Image (cartoon, helix red, strand yellow):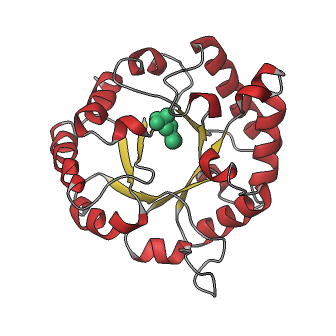
């Protein structure tokens, strides 16, 4: 099971120390099979990198530019830059970035160069409430997957984060039956259209210590992408504990 902490645009050098408790926790439960990845804002990547060195916790970034190494792109960070600072993962296609103009084409190029640089990808997909009401969920997920994934080898290393936009930060989660159906749809699509046999699909959207046990009971779920609840160490640890113990 994967547990990805997405700190979004929160956190500073003071709040960084909350990771200490998570490091202690991961040492205590090192015999259990789980992977924790922290995705802090760019400003904290270096400090996080030092903290998680020699632990089982891994580091990720929340976005990157599609240019693999460097170029005249003011304010952007490339996959190779992320790699050089100790990042092993990068989130791509988050709905908060799609909603401010990120296109499937840009996402495809970002995935392509991130894979070439050796980063692991956390590829976010998900429908809006309006699309769900119009029963367009499958169509939207299919489009996002087929347009966002480049035609390259090693795609089987990509983690898919299924995040219904209407669940992010709202406290509303899908019914378990709906979630299971959508995860099955995604896995079948990856298997039949892209030849990825053992895909990993995580769920994201208002996951918290209270609802995680139920969510984790879904048989084909491979982990969680956690936003708000990952900012407090206790909440995040509880989420992991309730899933793996
Ligand atoms: C997210 O932003 O990826 C997310 C899942 O947020 P939250 O857990 O706060 O809904």
Q: Which quadrant of the structure image shows residue 238? A: top left
Question: Residue placed at 58% from the left, 85% from the top?
Answer: 70
Which residue is found at the position 66% from the left and 65% from the top? 110
Q: Position of residue 100 (x, y in %)?
A: 68, 54
**Residue 34 is at least partly visible in this image:** no
Residue 187 appears left or right of 29: right
Q: Which sits in the foreground, 239 or 197?
A: 239
Q: Residue at horizontal 55%, vertical 33%?
A: 168
Please tell me which residue lies in front, 175 or 184: 175
**Where, quadrant-wise, is the C terminus in this rendering?**
top left
How far across and down, in percent of the image, does residue 8 sit? 45, 51
* Residue 236 image point, x, y percent: 31, 35
Q: Quadrant of the rendered structure where residue 181 is?
A: top right
In the displayed structure image, the side of residue 167 where residue 9 appears, left or right: left
Give the image location of residue 40, x and y in percent.
Answer: 38, 56
Asked whether residue 187 appears in the rendered view, the answer is yes
Give the vertical position of 97 relative to 219 (above or below).
below
Judge from the rendering whether residue 165 lies leftward or rightward of residue 63; answer left or right.
right
Position of 195 relative to 80 (above/below): above
Residue at image point 52% right, 31% down: 205
């Amino acid at each position: 099971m994967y547990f990805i902490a997405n700190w979004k645009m929160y956190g500073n050098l003071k709040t960084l120390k909350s990771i200490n408790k998570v490091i202690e926790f991961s040492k205590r439960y090192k015999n259990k099979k789980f992977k924790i990845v922290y995705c802090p804002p760019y400003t904290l990547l270096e400090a996080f990198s030092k903290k998680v060195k020699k632990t089982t916790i891994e580091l990720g970034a929340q976005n990157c530019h599609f240019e693999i190494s460097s170029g005249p792109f003011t304010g952007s960070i490339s996959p190779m830059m992320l790699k050089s600072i100790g990042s092993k993962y990068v989130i791509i296609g988050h709905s908060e970035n799609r909603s401010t103009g990120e296109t499937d084409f840009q996402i495809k190029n970002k995935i392509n160069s991130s894979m070439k640089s050796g980063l692991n990808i956390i590829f976010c997909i998900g429908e809006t409430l309006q699309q769900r009401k119009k029963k367009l969920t499958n169509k939207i997920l299919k489009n996002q997957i087929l347009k966002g994934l480049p035609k390259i080898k090693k795609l089987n290393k990509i983690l898919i984060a299924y995040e219904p936009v209407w669940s992010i930060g709202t406290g509303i989660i899908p019914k378990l039956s709906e979630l299971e159906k959508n995860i099955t749809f995604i896995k079948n699509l990856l298997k039949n259209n892209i030849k990825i046999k053992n895909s990993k699909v995580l769920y994201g959207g208002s996951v918290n210590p209270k609802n995680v046990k139920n969510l984790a009971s879904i048989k084909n779920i491979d982990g969680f992408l956690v936003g708000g609840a990952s900012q407090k160490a206790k909440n995040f640890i509880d989420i992991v504990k309730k899933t793996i113990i």
